[in-house]
Amino acid sequence: MPESLLVRGGRVVDATGERAADVLIEAGVVVAVEPGLHGDETLDAAGCVVAPGLVDLHTHLREPGHEEAETIETGARAAARGGFTAVVAMPNTEPAQDDPAVVAAVLAAGARSTCDVRAAGCITRGRRGTDLAPMGELHALGVRVFTDDGACVESAAMMRRALEYAGSLPGAVVAQHAEDAALCEGGHMHEGEWSSRLGIPGRPAVAEVSVVARDCLLAELTGTPVHFLHVSTEGAIALIRDAKQRGLPVTAEAAPHHFTLTDAECASFDPMFKVHPPLRSAADVAAVKIGLADGTIDAIATDHAPHAPETKERPFEEAPPGMLGLETALGLTLTELVEPGVVSLSDALALLSWRPAAVAGLVDHGGPVAPGRPAHLVVFDPAATWTVDPARLASKARNTPYPGRTLTGRVRHTLRAGEPVVIDGEAQR
Ligand SMILES: [Zn+2]
């Protein structure tokens, strides 16, 4: 690495505001932020926003167990190309991240990758919902987010026990995939007008809303923070808004597909549009946007869910749920939320960087671009347009629901601890 690296000519945007400034980096740390600096090497940021790197609370990296779909290395590369400097790796691997050895292996592979990979730990062993995972041992390895994602913690008693135990672990948050399995049984898309018309069994909104209602009460009872993963319904968002007004320790995230796509897409019977929770009605999409704009929803999280091509070529009802998200999240946010004026650029970055960093307790990420801070940065051109081409994604998988979509806002450079892991849109390793 050169002695010093200069990110020159950009507009620095962080939680403290924005200003035109160069950013000088030495030994992985920001050492100066002001106009007119000099460095041994330079990255051009003219016309670009320079911001704290993006933080994804919800990434499926598939390793161990499904390396045919993604590995920690390829997923971290996709993250870097998407402007993310940290991701929380979901624990529904095989074996699951319910065991210190598995978590340690994920963290070790992440340390070699182009992104700061943090592991979420399971709430229950094997995500089976029957007995608690060794949360204390996982916490000792640095795990702060506990979730059975992919599965909902069905039992109220088990969720209560998990919250009581997590309450003794500093910084721990219990993250719920809020979908009542019994209400969703056999369902493959949102239950509504479109599911009736298409004859595809549905997953009703109430499956999400009822679990959110219950878990808000359990957050109140235990005082332990609950984070709601990928909220997608008007009803759940209203409950979370109300819980926050009552001062309950709840946070929530929404995925880009839940503010950009509706259940009408399923009319194509294209399994690329199959996801859990499912794409919802236009009214739900509008509610997600309002929730993002008014602060009810704390974070945009990708729910990046890679699948090998052959599995997504099956008929809709047999294909696995999930879609890619890391490389399109920033572009979708800028195009669908910032351009139409739903949120400001700075609020969009709050949703993609510093607020998720706070939820997961990632103190090295999301902080201001200031001397002494680790240089985890994203540099993006907010005006550049590009077209999503599945063949050009860094992810090992190709299951994006946005092929051919033109987006405004493109990542130019991503720096992980001062190392330019992406330069001019190209991954460096
Ligand atoms: Zn989930």
Image (spheres, rainbow, N blue to C red):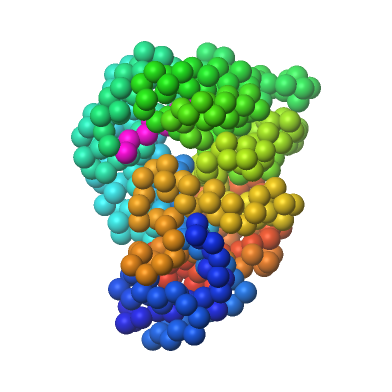
- In the rendered view, would you say 266 is above or below 362? above
Image location of residue 315, percent across then percent down? 64, 31
Q: Is residue 237 left or right of residue 247?
A: right
- In the rendered view, would you say 36 is above or below 74? below
Magenta residue check for 62: no
Quadrant that contains the C terminus:
bottom left
Residue depicted at x 44% and y 79%: 6
- Report whether residue 257 is seen: no
- Residue range of the region highlighted in magenta in the rendering: 171-178
Q: Quadrant of residue 320?
A: top right
Q: Quadrant of residue 198?
A: top right
Image location of residue 248, percent across then percent down? 46, 27
Residue depicted at x 58% and y 56%: 346
- Report whether residue 279 is seen: yes
Observer-nearest of 422 and 68: 422
Q: Quadrant of residue 254?
A: top right
Q: How many marks?
A: 0
